[in-house]
Image (cartoon, rainbow, N blue to C red):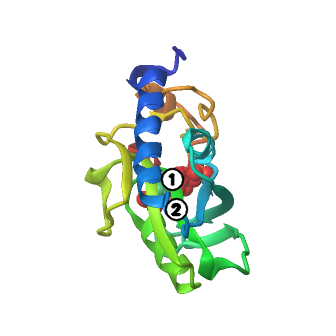
Amino acid sequence: MNPDVESILISQEELGRIITRLASEIERDYSAPDKRLVLVSILKGSVIFAGALMTALKIPAEIEFMRVSSYGAGTVSSGNTKILLDFHRPDLPLLDLLIVENIIDSGRTLSNLTRLLLGRGARSVKSCTLLDKPARREVPFEPDYIGAVIPDRFVVGFGLDYDEKYRNLPYVGVLKPEIYNSNPKRPPMSFMKGNPAKR
Ligand code: PRP
């Protein structure tokens, strides 16, 4: 185990089981011949989960990428989702989009993105998150597929970072508080979100 990690919340084996279960739920809903499944991976955090989910799917699936930021300049979280990287598909009205996230926290990212992609004319828009922290919800949003509901702890690994580190851990672990409490480069609380110490 990484020495900065206090405990493992979801092991590599458990993640594998969760992803297999999510893939079969998605297959069940998207196997009709007229469905055209496109995963929309939200960078950076979801990249590992999206890749694992995609390889677990036994039905045709395409992938696109977006990168977003829910900050307004100098504010905590404005509720606006700024698009930093976008995808363009002229065939959008024929596509069944599945937004793939590694975590849902306030709910702003998934809520805003769902509305945006439906507004652009996608045939359908659903969402799948590996982790759900319902205790942190600020806008009502329920993803269609949820890997695991977790408590409000500072989690890293399997795509989740602290200061861009730990994304490559093959499990989801709880970060030791001394790591984020002792970081002199840590931005002011008001500029962070997602994890408890990122608020
Ligand atoms: C995290 C996570 C989601 C979002 C969820 O991304 O990957 O995209 O926050 O938070 P919300 O429900 O409050 O909107 P983050 O902004 O940390 O960027 P990253 O994926 O590049 O690490």
- The residue at 59%/31% (across/down) is 166
Residue 190 in view: no
Q: Secondary structure at mark 2?
A: strand
Residue 41 sits in quarter: bottom right
Left or right of residue 178, residue 141 in this image: left
What residue does disc 1 label? 101
Residue 20: x and y in percent read 46, 36
Residue 90: x and y in percent read 73, 81
Could you classify mark 1 by the number of other residues whose Cα lies within 10 Å: few (under 14), some (14-19), or many (20 or more)? many
The residue type indicated by label 2 comes to Leu
- The residue at 47%/51% (across/down) is 27
Q: Nearer the viewer, residue 59 or 64?
A: 59
Ligand 1 closer than 8 Å to the CB at disc 1? yes
* Disc ID at residue 143: none
Q: Nearer the viewer, residue 188 or 12?
A: 12
Cα distance between the residues tagged 2 and 1: 10 Å
What residue does disc 2 label? 98
Q: Is residue 49 above or below residue 115?
A: above
The residue type indicated by label 1 comes to Glu
- The residue at 62%/55% (across/down) is 61
